[in-house]
Image (tube, helix red, strand yellow):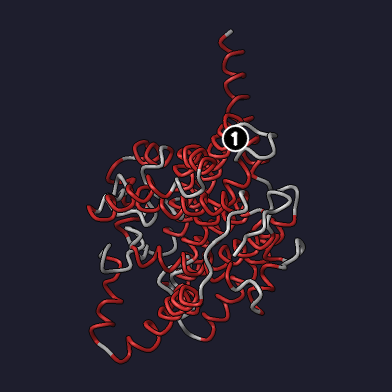
Amino acid sequence: MHITAPSSTRIHAIDAIRGFCLLNIFINHIYVGVLNGFSPSRVMFSDSAEAFVFLAGISCFLAYSPRDNQRSLAEGRAKVWRRAVTLFLVNMVIAFASLGILLVSATFADPAHPAIFPTEMIQEHGLATYLWHILTMQQNVGYTVVLRLYVALLVVAPLYIWLATIRFWLPLIPAGAIWVIAGHFGLVEVNSLNHVDLALTLLPWNLVFAAGVALGAAIVQKRSFPQHNVLTGAAALLVLAGPICFVVLTRLSPEILDWVNTRNDYFWTGASKTLQSPLRVLYMAALAYLFIAWRHAPVVRMVHNVSADNPLTQLGRKSLEVFAAGAILAVAVDNLLWALSVNRIVQLESANAIALEIALTAAAFVIMLRIARSDRFTTATVSKLIQDTVFNRRRRTNIARA
């Protein structure tokens, strides 16, 4: 089974899948509503987070690896780290926008989880300390944990890219060793102020990223992959095992229901997202394998042949901008629904609440699509605005001192 190397660094199928993941991530981040109960993530052993990190690894190799003698490893490394700086700056925009929304919402309703709410932590540790921990990405606010992980992954990405240029599978060796040690011993990072485990942490999650880098290298190097009926059948059975487990078996077996409810607590025998359990990694690998092996299946063929003008492709092509908007909008929608329910304006899970959630979600989707189609909303614009603000302020200070 061969994977065709692209003529350019953009593969529309990757963008389309990433676009679907962006919409799914947005819905999953609205905890107050009911729509997240219909997310595919609820019936799978892995979710959009794994797909997003895996695709980031593929795109990273395609975009920054030496190709056709047009770019050296050093040039690629510089571009990767500049991208990491951009992600950091965008993450600060998400952080402070989310912080503002959370503080405003606190004036209308008591928070659902006071222990992790900014007001409580500011009162306990002081505003200066709290802001410093946000700026240094030690403390999560809103959904900044996602880009925090990406910044860390891009810092180590040049090493994985270099290894993949030698042998496409080489990044899996150090990444796999780190993953096993971190998962087995529970080496996960925590928020610095409230000591809550981060859902996405570098050590357990670096294997998913490295696997994406390896596949990106295999695509560029035109490597062939084994395709056997037994292997394809095993991958299909594993993928189907998720819906069967969550939808059917949990209703038939109390033991399985208990495992499902506690699966995030264990690495080897569970399906922990924080620890990135083997089951989650295998599930993601099975999905990726079937996407490649069944490229001529009706639905899969549609994704492989998706056009550049498809809305999902457009969303995925500007994934950072769309994710940033979605992360901020999800905090706003979630807290608006919560405030309305606390003040008894709407009752959660009522027809009015569901209609309102659908309307707000649709409006958010329209906003994200407008951003994806606009040339005005780009990370380069945000990065330049922040840097110009900082540097101009320094310049004005130096002039004043002179």
Q: Nearer the viewer, residue 134 or 275?
A: 275
Q: Residue furthest bottom?
A: 252
The residue tagged with tag 1: helix, strand or loop? Answer: helix
Q: Residue at x 49, y 60 (%)?
A: 331
The quadrant where residue 256 appears: bottom left
The x and y percentages for residue 169 are 47, 50
Q: Quadrant of the N terminus?
A: bottom right
Q: Residue at x 62, y 37 (%)?
A: 66
Task: Give the vertical position of 42 relative to 401 (above or below).
Answer: below
The amino acid type of the residue labelled 1 equals Gly
Disc 1 target residue: 76
Q: Can residue 99 be seen? A: no
The x and y percentages for residue 73 are 58, 32
Q: Residues within 10 Å of mark 1 (few under 14, many from 20)?
A: many
The x and y percentages for residue 397 are 57, 18
Q: Nearer the viewer, residue 173 or 342?
A: 173
In the visual, does 204 lie left or right of 322? left
Q: Residue at x 33, y 47 (%)?
A: 178
The quadrant where residue 243 appears: bottom left
Q: Quadrant of the C terminus?
A: top right
Q: Residue at x 57, y 62 (%)?
A: 22
